[in-house]
Image: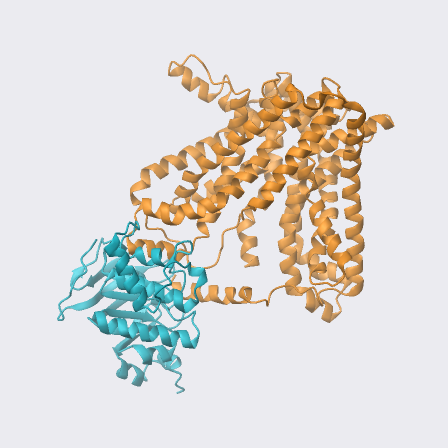
Amino acid sequence: MPEPSSPKPDIHAIRLAAATVSFKDKNLVFDCTIPQGASVAVTGPSGAGKSTLFNVIAGFQPIRSGSVEIFGKDMAGRDPAERPVSIVFQENNLFAHLTVEQNVGLGIDPSLRLDADGRGRVDDALSRAGLGGFGQRKPAQLSGGERQRVALARAIVRRRPILLLDEPFAALDPAMRADMAALLAQLREETNSTLLFITHQLEDVQRLADRAMFIDRGLIAFAAPLETFLEHRRLPALNDFLGIDR
Amino acid sequence: MAGGDEREVRIARRRPGQGNGRRISGHGMYTTSERRAITGAGGFTLAFIVLFAGLATGVLLLHAQDGAGGTLFDAYLFRITRFTLLQAGVSTLLSVVLAIPVARALARRRAFTGRSWIIRLSALPLGLPALVAALGIVEVWGRRGVINELLAAMGLANPVSVYGLAGILIAHVFFNLPLAVRLLLAGLERIPAEYWLTSANLGMRSGAVFRLIEWPVIRGLLPGVAGLVFMLCATSFTIVLTLGGGPAATTIEVAIYQALRFDFDPPRAVILSALQILLTGTLLLVLRLLGTPAEEAPTTGRTIRRFDGARERLTDALVIGAFVAFTAAPLLAVVASGLAADLPRLAVDPLLHRALITSLLISLASATLCLVIAIPTVAIGPASENRPETPLRLLAGGLHAASSLILLVPPVVVATGWFLMLRGLGGTARFAPFVIVVINALMALPFVVRVLAPAYRTHVARTGRLSVSLGVTAWHRIRWIDLPALRRPLMTAFAFAMALSLGDLSAVAIFGADGIVTLPWLLFSRMGSYRTADAAGVALLLGIVCLLLTLPSTASEKTTSKHDA
């Protein structure tokens, strides 16, 4: 298993330098640096490349040129599991036929052979996610919000310093969104991890992010600390997102 | 393509399915007179099916009463029952166990050249007449086939014999391994794409992926797949007739044929028929408990990308290669030996012309009849839903059950009943074509209903209320709304029913000696009389026609499910 690294504060968590992905009909080029401990909202129109950006960082999508550095280390040739990254999707994060406990346990040992210490860590993470006593249930017995919190509990036991959340709130109702956002904020505070999340809701951006980026047509069109981001008026597409009429 | 837009499409598509929004309520989908017409047609259809199969079964039971005294269950019956179950059991075990590695390999190798062709190849045996396949298998595995020549070259003295249990098993695996592969592969492809991303992110290795993700899915499908394959093997007639057939390798269905055609012992045929119905009835009950596996994989959602199995590249290549060789070899052998036959002489053979014309007439008539029966059967489903009147609901349930009646009472049994009945009326030859047409239509019915029912259901859900509110009803509705929208599934179903009838030997075998010569019957008699070159030519012709006819039903699978999504 790779190092549960304790990164030095002066190194950027993520640095993409002209990381280029080629699809049949388009090229996507990503350039950005994300400081350690940041919470970054990733926004932009559908099909702009938000998920592809996450796939590049997580190692699901090979890049044609450029580089991906995480904590100063080049990630070229590293499998998804060898990167200090955990990823949570909008849905299907849990294996439906495994119990909650087993789903979280996979974060400790991917072949699910757990010792007493591992089981203790699973229980601990579940109660931190507000799911104490849910260990023996199957995902189908949980609400959508509870399932997403199980996914977070797994991220907790994995102890990876970077957490990518691909529309984690999209399938949740407003009360669940608020719950989950609170849990994320708490998690970030406790572990000082770096958070990137994709969202279409301005509310999520304001609630959880301290930085934001806007992706449009395969490029990171604008990235800034939150206040600057919200004040920005020069990108029509971003204005549309922010709901500003010109 | 970036994932964002795909996902939104999926959400948009999924939402309506979650609520009750798309359920057909039955209210407002039809006018009263339309519903009355459907009810009338349905009642007529149900009466026809039940009468046709019921008369045959009734005659059999009557004969059974005066025919069978003490010989109800002698050693012979016991032996063939045991062989029927044994060969079906071993065939099922081989097909299903071998299908697991093939389906796994195909599921995790998502993008190699030729993958889509291999999946198409695995749909071919389904459309191939059993007799043609048997010929191809003899060419490959027979005494002078490729395999035995290879073995001889390696200095092995005892060649594999294709006749008997070995040949039956090879043929059944040839038909059912690809079927099982397709069903398991569809199951594996229904696994959400996020599972593979998550497992890669977590660092699961191939062993853990199998144990924790693939096996739970496969295990869930196994009972249904195995039950289906067992049913197909236990009622397999043509394969056992051509490759088995000796006293040591006979199934109940073939024994019925032999009792009737060779020993002329109707009472024995009757008892065997009763035994067959008992067996298929039990199997159908078990199958119902096991549930039938779905064949279509979802076409929405994220594209599946797999990150596991990097180390299994070589084994996967070997497994897929072996599967392709096993499945393609008999097909290629049919083509090769067919082209080597004296085709010009065969082309002017009057008997072949006669057989071709007879086969075409019978299959056209039977496909037409099949659709005539299938349409009320399919239409009555949505028309009866959420209706208070119980008679309509009962009628719909009855038709649904009747459409699968041929699975309970196999073609050979129905044919035997009618043969005995017509013999009593004097002369089977005159009525034989009509009986064969109806039996072939009933054989295709379960499959045709399975093609048409979902298409029609979706169509009515989309257009029912609109048509009624616009007053486009009755014939106008059929002409302008239903036929144009359902033309493709109707044609697919028609072609499939035709192919099934063209390739069928079971019904015609019972009547065969009485002057009816169809293509399969001609092929069968040429194979039997060692005119193998002629047989190869006929097989090639029959194989090509049937594959062309079943092509739409296998090729359109993806597109139809896309339309339905």
Residue A135 percent location from the top left of the image: 36, 60
The vertical placement of B194 against B110, above or below, is below
Q: Locate residue B410: give its quadrant.
A: top right
* Quadrant of the drawing holding the N terminus of chain B: bottom left
Residue at 22 percent across and 72 percent down: it is A190
* B155 vs B475, nearest the viewer: B155
The vertical placement of A47 against B168, above or below, is below
**Model colouring:** by chain
Residue B259 in view, yes or no: yes
Give left or right: position of B275 versus A155: right
Please identify the residue farthest to the right as the structure is shown: B425
Residue A61 in view, yes or no: no
* A241 vs B245, nearest the viewer: B245
* Quadrant of the drawing holding the C terminus of chain B: bottom right
Residue at 71 percent across and 68 percent down: it is B28
Give left or right: position of B225 versus B475: left
Chain B: its colour in the image is orange
The vertical placement of A128 against B356, above or below, is below
- Which chain is represented by cyan in the image? A
Residue A121 percent location from the top left of the image: 26, 60
Say how many tags the image has.
Answer: 0
Residue at 76 percent across and 43 percent down: it is B49
